[in-house]
Image: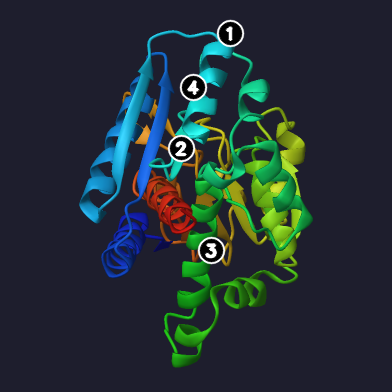
Amino acid sequence: MNIINGEHIAQQIKQKLKTQIEQANLKPKLAILYIGDNAASEVYIEKKVAWGKEIGITTEVIRYVNASTAEIIGKLKELNGTKSISGYIIQLPIPRHLNRNEILQHIKPEKDVDGLSPVSLGLLWQGNNPGFIPATVLAILECIKFVARYEDNKYTVDELDTNESTLLERYLTGKKVLIINHSIIVGKPLAAKLLDYKSTVTIAHKDTTSAVLDKLVHDTDIIVSATGIKDLIKSELIHDGQVIIDAGINKTAQGIGGDIDHQELQGKKIWISPVPGGVGPITVAMLLQNTVIASKGH
């Protein structure tokens, strides 16, 4: 079993960003709009703030214990017009009484570093996207890129010099990819990017029947699962040669885990991202990368 070390990948991305910021004398600033009280969100926000500080990104956390949809939209309009803010995100999940779709419509595309506005998502489906892509999607692509470079346990000069998009297209063309998630954060935008790279994409989700899901899991090259349901994927269905990007997270008495029991996969010739330490840290790094890109447009 080969591990995709997300912490290592994230540290490399952070170092590149720090160098870019210093060399170009950039002043990136990220605003995080946080509504409600969610323990997991608190952890994610702390990491975004800490990593931003490490590489030279100023972060402002705007907290609301509670708020109406109108209040949040008013704040977004203010952020849209604040020149010092390079980009901003709405920390998800948000309280259920808020109209998420209406709120997302008011995010200025140039500052949409989470890539969740209708304009950003629409551009993504058009291909050759000039807008921002959700950070989790970028993180999953980084995991796949890692496998594309290292699957033969060699790192050739040709692979080193290859354009990243070319590398992904060369690796993904014709491959069958199963995405188990249909959200606007992961499943839908990821499907759009994978189609750009000429892979064959199937989307399932937590309500897909077990019989159908079992067949799909067995008959695919790459599995991306992000449901947060423990042991959603039966380990006996995983076979040599598959790549598993586990982007799910759940907490039990045994600790934090993903959508599949990694211990049961020991000995199989597969690639897999761990939970924790896989997609999560890369996602934070990719959000910071989007923020740096946004700051260049100021």
Above or below, 272 against 151 in this view is: above
| Disc 4: which residue | 75
Please say if the residues under marks 1 and 3 sit with CB atoms less than 8 Å apart. Answer: no
Judging depth in this view, the residue of 225 and 9 nearest the camera is 9
Res. 98 image quadrant = top right
| Three-letter amino acid code of the residue under disc 3 | Ile
Pinpoint residue 81: horizontal percent, then vertical percent. Answer: 50, 34
Pinpoint residue 257: horizontal percent, then vertical percent. Answer: 40, 37
Q: Earlier in the sequence, mark 2 or mark 3?
A: 2
| Disc 3: which residue | 144
Give how far apart the Cα atoms at labels 1 and 2 are.
22 Å
Give how far apart the Cα atoms at labels 2 and 4 are.
11 Å
Left or right: 222, with 250 as reference point: right
Q: Nearer the viewer, mark 2 or mark 3?
A: 2
Give how far apart the Cα atoms at labels 2 and 3 are.
27 Å
Q: Residue at x 48, y 80 (%)?
A: 152
Q: Earlier in the sequence, mark 3 or mark 4?
A: 4
Res. 17 image quadrant = bottom left
Can residue 92 be seen in the rendering of this structure?
Answer: no
The secondary structure type at the circle numbered 4 is helix
| Three-letter amino acid code of the residue under disc 1 | His
Rate crowding at label 2 as few (under 14), some (14 to 19) or many (20 or more) other CA atoms within 10 Å: many
Circle number at residue 88: 2
| Disc 1: which residue | 97
Q: Nearer the viewer, mark 3 or mark 4?
A: 4
